[in-house]
Amino acid sequence: MTKPAPPPQAPVGDWATDFDLAEPEYNERAVEIWSDLRSRCPVAHTTRYGGAWLPVRHEHIRQIAYDTEHYTSRGVVVGNLRPIVPGPAGAAPPITSDPPFHGEARRLLLPAFAPKRIALLEPDIRLLCQRQLAKLGSVSAGDQIDAAVDYAQQVPGAVMARLLGLPETDHELFRGFVHDLLEGVNLPEDEMARRRDRFDAYLDEQIAAHRRAPQDDLTTFLSEATIDGQPLAPQHVRGTIALLLLAGIDTTWSLLGSSLHHLATHQADLKRLRENPSLLPTAIEEFLRAYAPATMARLVKQSHDFHGHAFQEEDWVLLPFAAANRDPEVFERADEILIDRAVNPHAAFGLGIHRCLGSNLARLELRVALEEFLARFPSFEPGDEAVRWSVGQIRGPRRLSLRLLEVQNPIAPETTIPRTEYTRSRS
């Protein structure tokens, strides 16, 4: 059963009965909206996109995330273009795969994202951060920069390009793909299909180049990989690369931007980190909890009752993990950001079988990127331009104006960053 996409609708009225994550107001006021819904309507509904539900309590989000009987992962991004790739792999395995195939597709990637393998990337990531900071040129105290566009949005793209063996010079293309596929979800179906086709054509070109000239990277690894002795289907290879590229870029740059925004608007926390850098690991976990960027989605397999709500077959169900992390039933002082929070069982990387494969890499990138930014700019505050937030299921600043209050002399990074060989050497 496939539901037709509805025609464009008017702006949101009541978030409890007519929400839309493509409305700019949603990500701008997400914490306030979740709090309001939690108190009066913990499972919101909309008729947009063929019908969708939005639970905001931790217990409900957790229940759905772990339930593979009533919900399929075939669709993880809500939009007018509904999933057209059937199981078992779906469009972007393993995140679009259901059990039992999901386990096979996920196990294939686990060694490449193991902690010891990811740790080898730290020198590369540090040099990438230094190089990006050097590109800001000669800045002085009082100058303003866009920390989202000129820093946060650059580092993850460069990291994923190196892991996948894609041209680092394509970073503007990557940003365009993120916007097209994760933010343009309310566009007409034919336009969404054209954008998806452009992305697929780019990936097909890159995969073909790797088949002609294999490299030590994940694109070559996936092109040569097998499950049960059989090569991966071309759609599987392309879909997994698409997943790694889009998810590895957008979630990380969004969290880095949100973290810098928090420090700019909470000068006491910035001062504490400056005076006590050993707080950074716990601060990062708190940023993950409070600003978890990802909202994943599921599709209802068959109609059923969910705590008094009539979930219909093929309805979307959104899982905003940051809303779960802000639930006062689970976290003490849930809406306060405590950078020394000792106990922090957050769900920033998801819950259930689809918990983020790249959590080790995301933590490493965030730590190194913050260390390098704070070393260069120990003190900063909000700039003159208002923050512009993303739209869609990944929440983070798209524009982040910061006024630099203190600038340290940069260390000139190497112009060429040697690639760490770790992909083929894994055991």
Image (cartoon, rainbow, N blue to C red):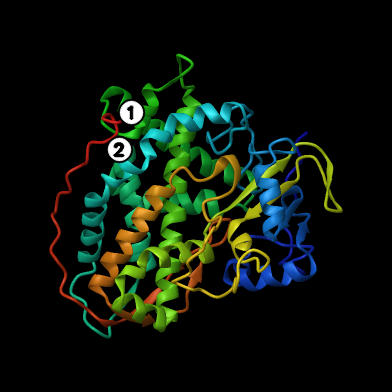
Query: Residue at (55%, 39%) from the top-left corner?
Result: 95
Residue type for callout 2: Gly
Residue occupied by mark 1: 220
Residue occupied by mark 2: 165
Q: Position of residue 19 (x, y in %)?
A: 72, 62
Q: Is residue 6 above or below residue 233?
A: below
How many residues crowd around disc 1 within 10 Å: few (fewer than 14), some, or many (20 or more)?
many
Residue type for callout 1: Thr
Point out the tag, 2 or 1, that comes first from the N-terminus.
Answer: 2
Q: Secondary structure at mark 1?
A: helix
Q: Secondary structure at mark 2?
A: loop
Q: Which quadrant of the figure has residue 59? A: bottom right
Q: Nearer the viewer, residue 237 or 189?
A: 237
Asked whether disc 2 touches disc 1, contact meaning CB atoms under 8 Å apart, the reply is yes
Q: Position of residue 20 (x, y in %)?
A: 68, 60
Q: Nearer the viewer, residue 409 or 138?
A: 409
Q: Position of residue 340 (x, y in %)?
A: 44, 71
Query: Residue at (27%, 77%) from the top-left corner?
Result: 378
Return the residue found at the far top. 229
